[in-house]
Amino acid sequence: MKKIMITGACGQIGSELVEKLRRDYGTDNVLATDIRKPAEMTGPFEILDVMDAEKMMQLAQDFEADTLMHMAALLSATAENNPVFAWNLNMGGLMNALETARKLNLQFFTPSSIGAFGPSTEKENTAQDTLQRPTTMYGVNKVAGELLCDYYYTKFGVDTRGVRFPGLISNVTLPGGGTTDYAVEIYYKAITEGHYTSYIAEGTYMDMMYMPDALDAIVDLMEADGDRLVHRNAFNITAMSFEPSQIAAAIKKYIPSFEMNYEVDPARQEIADSWPDSLDCSAAKEEWDFKANYDLDRMTKDMIEKLTLKLKNQAS
Ligand code: SER
């Protein structure tokens, strides 16, 4: 990777990925694109609607990109509320990005998700290669996307790579419209109000990961020796698996007065219930040495420290 173009650069992952890549590869070697211009962005930025295939190609060509990271997508709960739009954006955007990569011979990354599994998948230690019959539009998009990326590699030789991300927790940009968002919101509310009402029911386990580990995973996979990769796309990765009362207990260690209650949102609960409890990520470990550094306690300590500072600065 020398000249990297990113779509969805203002999203939850994109906003931090751009910063990391600019630190590692040089500001001018990373072109951030999104449908709207962020309030603060230093370094190359262009407005791009991922449905505009021609503009995507032109921007990548003018930038002389050698890598395309396609991050623009609707998350699970939003996609469920507008399935036709989700199909058009998630699949149309991905096709445009893959075609750009094929025509310009770019290395390619796009994320899949735990949402690519469904209720008939085994819940615990979910295997890398297993039954995938998701019951959400987001999941349908992710499975189709995984297959498309494999197809572009086998058919056209495009160097496609990707992971199945679990819920991602970060203190920079809020996620929007996901099922796992509760695990981010809870930290904000713990600090500002000392209380959180969880829309996910007690006992609902989902895989999660702290953003620094997610960003390292992207770079490690992209820099990995391609000859070692058997799977290439859709590697299971995870750092921890917890349910709401466990994250609440972890927060209570640092904010002893914190309290949580439940008001379950049936729509998002149904999505969560259809996903695995915990993924097996041995393929990622074997093929490109995946590792995660943050467990629930270490992440919680860091989240509370960083968010407290951020929210204090915002208030002053
Ligand atoms: N975090 C995503 C969501 O909840 C899952 O990939 O939609």
Image (cartoon, rainbow, N blue to C red):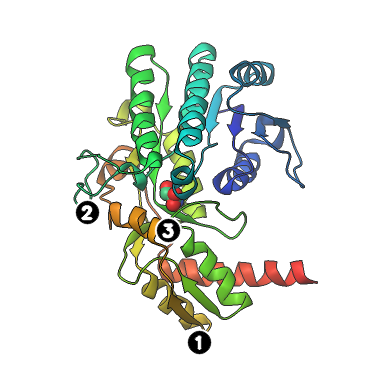
- Element assignment for label 2: loop
Nearer to me, 165 or 293: 165
* Secondary element type, mark 3: loop
Q: Are marks 2 and 3 in contact (CB under 8 Å)?
A: no
- Residue 216, x across and y down, in percent: 48, 46
**Among the two numbered marks 1 and 2 on one chain, the one whose residue lies closer to the N terminus:** 2
If you read the primary sequence from the N terminus, does the residue marked by circle 3 or circle 1 appear first? 1
**Residue with the most extreme right position:** 316
Please name the residue that numbered disc 2 is placed on: 125
Residue 24 appears at what percent x and percent y?
61, 41
- Dividing the picture into quadrants, the one containing residue 297 is bottom left
Residue 303 badge: none
Residue at x 58% of width, y 18% of height: 53
Q: Which numbered disc covers residue 293?
A: 3
Give the x, y percent position of residue 121. Answer: 21, 47
On residue 256, which mark appears? Answer: 1
Reply above or below: 110 against 195: above
Report, in whole angstroms, how far the alpha carbon at label 1 lies from the one at label 2: 33 Å
Alpha carbon distance from label 3 to label 1: 25 Å
Mark 1: amino acid: Pro
At 42% across and 63% down in the image, what residue appears? 265
Eye-nearest disc, 2 or 3: 2
Mark 2–mark 3 Cα distance, whole angstroms, equals 19 Å
Q: Position of residue 9 (x, y in %)?
A: 62, 39
Compared with residue 17, is residue 168 higher up or lower down, i.e. above or below?
Answer: below
